[in-house]
Amino acid sequence: MKSIVRASAVIKSTFQSPRGIFLTLVLTSLLSCGFGVIENNSAGAIPYPDGTQISQSQANELPKTIANKILGDASFRSGLRKRELEITQVTSKTFGNPCEFKFGEVCTREYNPIEGWEVVVKVRQDSWTYHVDKSGKQRILDPKVSTSQTLPKAIADAILTDASSRSGVEITDVKITQTTPKTFGNLCQFNFGEVCTQQYDPVEGWEVIVKVKEQSWIYHVNKSTSQIILDPKANATEKSK
């Protein structure tokens, strides 16, 4: 009993001393930090409509290589630099089937799941939504997004020169009426194939419509401008030399 009383007296004198006061403050600070970490982890959870919550770390698990590809696509379509764009939201998601993955508005209930993410990119004052699969090979932009990009002058000139040469019309009388940045599913689609496989090997580029006399010719051009393809259905007659 005496030993207990003696120990109590020692503890009391210790915490009343300057060193004891310092230790008390340190312990209080550590406990506060600990509780703060717990609270922050809880606050970092993201609620979803079905009631589940996913931590911030899980939501941001999008690999850097895939994030760069998405930002590269948004940069290409918008004409902005990558550093001017920002990924504002990443949601890990299981899409029920390819139709849902490709933003189909009317899809069957077939269950052929695609694991991936829904990614929101801030482009100027707009928010663009992408669907991307786990491999990063399939990156689909919501078709409702209004994108605008100026076709590089060198490409425009090459297309106009080609249309003029094929039609025999002076280049000043040939006009580009529409340009659309586009991701072609594969080379077959890029080359205007009518029966193509479902293989997804994307080709980034543009679809360009040119007015030649009273006709509208459709061109496909890839991002590097190494390929400029005219729709074979166009009634193009090579000018005689």
Image: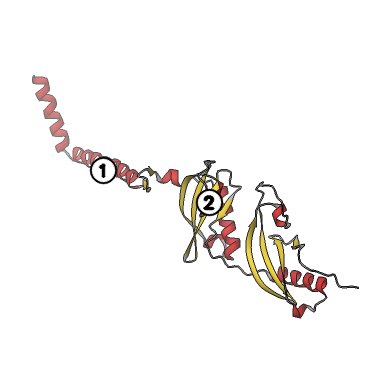
Residue type beneath disc 1: Ser
| Residue at left offset 24%, top offset 39% | 27
Q: Foreground: 68 or 161?
A: 161
| Residue at left offset 47%, top offset 45% | 92
135 left or right of 199 in image: left
Q: Which element carries disc 1, helix, strand or loop?
A: helix
| Residue at left offset 28%, top offset 42% | 35
Task: Tell me the mark number nearer the camera, choosing from 2 and 1.
Answer: 2
Q: Position of residue 222 (x, y in %)?
A: 70, 60
Position of the C terminus, as image quadrant, is bottom right
102 left or right of 235 in image: left
Q: Position of residue 18 (x, y in %)?
A: 18, 40
Position of the N terminus, as image quadrant, is top left
Question: Can you identify the residue that label 2 sits on?
Answer: 131
Question: Can you identify the residue that label 1 sits on?
Answer: 32
Dot 2: within a 10 Å radius of its alpha carbon, few (fewer than 14), some, or many (20 or more) residues? Answer: many
Q: Foreground: 205 or 185?
A: 185
